[in-house]
Image (cartoon, rainbow, N blue to C red):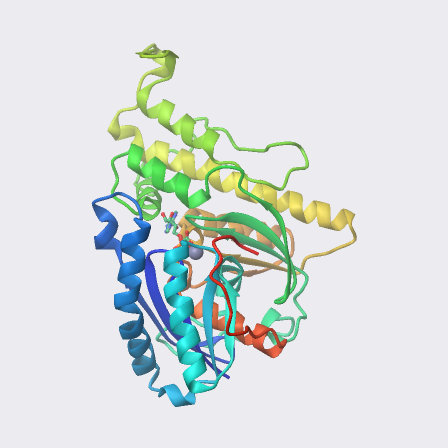
């Protein structure tokens, strides 16, 4: 099937054409980065207005790059949750209008679940078709049940994926998302937004020592499958500014002296080490707890902006190998928000008969 997919949940207007759930014929992303830069964060009202202007040109571009006309589309998919309500509404209204006027099915897709699917997509622009291995989750379910991890700027959660239409959340962050922690640590080091890639780069500076700073790895209660990144973030802040002894006064003894910028590469590396260790610790708990329930995961599905992180990619590969899991890491083009992942997951929803009605709502929360 040929699916036209739209994604407007936050500050990227995206459209893609995906064939048969894995083959990405086009993946167009109109970034609003410049519009929000001066506010150091996404301004919802500016985002929705920009989506209104960008959505149809983005769809046109996606069709042109795929070399197809609207009449060839079998269905229209849209990320209808979660996200900024004004932004979601633009994509949902556009998708409804397109699907209705073409007489084709409409498929509403949960954006966070679509991130889980992003490792199933073929790498862009090079005809690289991912082999349909026996046990490939897209090929009929042989690789389920799977453990899923989404780590992005807005979400950090683990899932049990029994099929593409049967997904249960196991745990989620109780405070900051992992990408949010990266972005805040970047700001503390005066690195420009979006900070995650810059912290990643700085941590790879020659001579950076990931053991220079002893930063906390969040565990929460012994059985918790939730995440927490705010303690780690605060520890980095204290490492940079010194530990406040009393309100308004800072302690500058040898143990707590503020960190000078020449130590930032080691601090960035130590932060990454702790943040990634917190993720693999919870993944391990999830695997161990599932075995106690008699469930053996076969695959590790991953997605979200932070899966572009070099350290996390290495750690996830090691984790998957240790636990005999087949790892689905997204190609770099599909880590960040995009519409291809929406179109890919929509294929499975459509095949399962899960199409949406014309009263499909934009919903700020995830399912
Ligand atoms: O998935 P995404 O585009 O948006 C959300 O759904 O939130 O993720 C964006 C997040 C940002 O916080 C960004 O800093 C982070 O992903 N990110 C990274 C890297 N590349 C993007 N974090 C760490 N290392 C990276 N290489
Ligand atoms: Zn996202």
Indicate left or right for 61 with 338 as reference. left
- Image: 243 above or below 345: above
Q: Nearer the viewer, residue 102 or 61?
A: 102
Q: Nearer the viewer, residue 336 or 257?
A: 336
**In the image as oriented, which residue stretches furthest toward the front?**
359
- Image: 140 above or below 204: below
Q: Is residue 31 visible?
A: no
Indicate left or right for 221 with 337 as reference. right
- Image: 116 above or below 70: above
Q: Residue at horizontal 44%, vertical 74%?
A: 96
Q: Residue at horizontal 57%, vertical 77%?
A: 350
Quadrant of ligand 2: it is bottom left
Tell me where residue 289 appears, x and y as whole percent: 72, 45
Image quadrant holding the C terminus, namely bottom right
Q: Nearer the viewer, residue 253 or 351?
A: 351
Q: How many marks?
A: 0
Q: Residue at horizontal 41%, vertical 63%?
A: 334
Tell me where residue 91 appears, x and y as whole percent: 39, 67
State the image quarter where residue 211 is shown.
top left
Q: Is residue 263 visible?
A: yes
Q: Nearer the viewer, residue 158 or 46?
A: 46
State the image quarter where residue 10 is shown.
bottom left
Tell me where residue 153 appears, x and y as whole percent: 41, 48
Tell me where residue 23 appears, x and y as whole percent: 46, 77
């Amino acid at each position: 099937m040929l699916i036209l997919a739209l994604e407007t949940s936050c500050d990227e207007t995206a459209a893609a054409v995906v064939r048969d759930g894995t083959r990405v014929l086009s993946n167009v992303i109109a970034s609003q980065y410049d519009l929000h830069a001066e506010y150091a964060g996404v301004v919802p009202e500016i985002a929705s207005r920009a989506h209104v202007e960008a959505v149809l040109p983005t769809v046109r571009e996606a069709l042109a790059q795929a070399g197809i006309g609207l009449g060839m589309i079998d269905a229209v998919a849209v990320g209808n949750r979660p996200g900024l309500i004004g932004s979601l509404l633009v994509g949902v209204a556009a998708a409804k209008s397109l699907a209705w006027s073409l007489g084709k099915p409409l498929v509403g897709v949960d954006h966070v679940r679509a991130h889980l699917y992003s490792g199933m997509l073929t790498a862009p622009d090079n005809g690289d078709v991912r082999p349909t291995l026996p046990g490939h989750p897209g090929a009929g379910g042989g690789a389920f049940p799977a453990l899923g991890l989404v780590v992005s700027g807005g979400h950090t959660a683990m899932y049990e994926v029994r099929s593409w239409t049967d997904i249960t959340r196991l745990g989620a962050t109780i405070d900051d998302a992992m990408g949010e922690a990266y972005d805040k640590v970047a700001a503390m080091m005066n690195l420009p937004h979006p900070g995650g890639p810059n912290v990643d780069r700085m941590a790879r500076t020659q001579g950076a020592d990931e053991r220079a700073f002893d930063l906390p790895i969040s565990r929460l209660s012994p059985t918790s499958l939730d995440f927490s990144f705010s303690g780690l973030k605060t520890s980095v802040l204290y490492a940079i500014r010194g530990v406040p002894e009393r309100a308004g006064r800072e302690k500058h003894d040898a143990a707590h002296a503020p960190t000078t910028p020449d130590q930032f590469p080691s601090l960035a590396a130590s932060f990454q080490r702790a943040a990634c260790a917190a993720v693999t610790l919870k993944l391990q708990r999830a695997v161990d707890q599932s075995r106690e329930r008699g469930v053996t995961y076969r695959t590790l599905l991953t997605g979200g902006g932070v899966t572009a992180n070099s350290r996390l990619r290495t750690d996830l590969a090691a984790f998957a190998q240790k636990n005999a899991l087949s790892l689905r890491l997204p190609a770099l083009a599909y880590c960040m928000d995009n519409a291809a992942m929406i179109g890919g997951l929509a294929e499975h929803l459509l095949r399962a008969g899960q199409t949406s009605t014309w009263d499909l709502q934009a919903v700020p929360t995830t399912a």
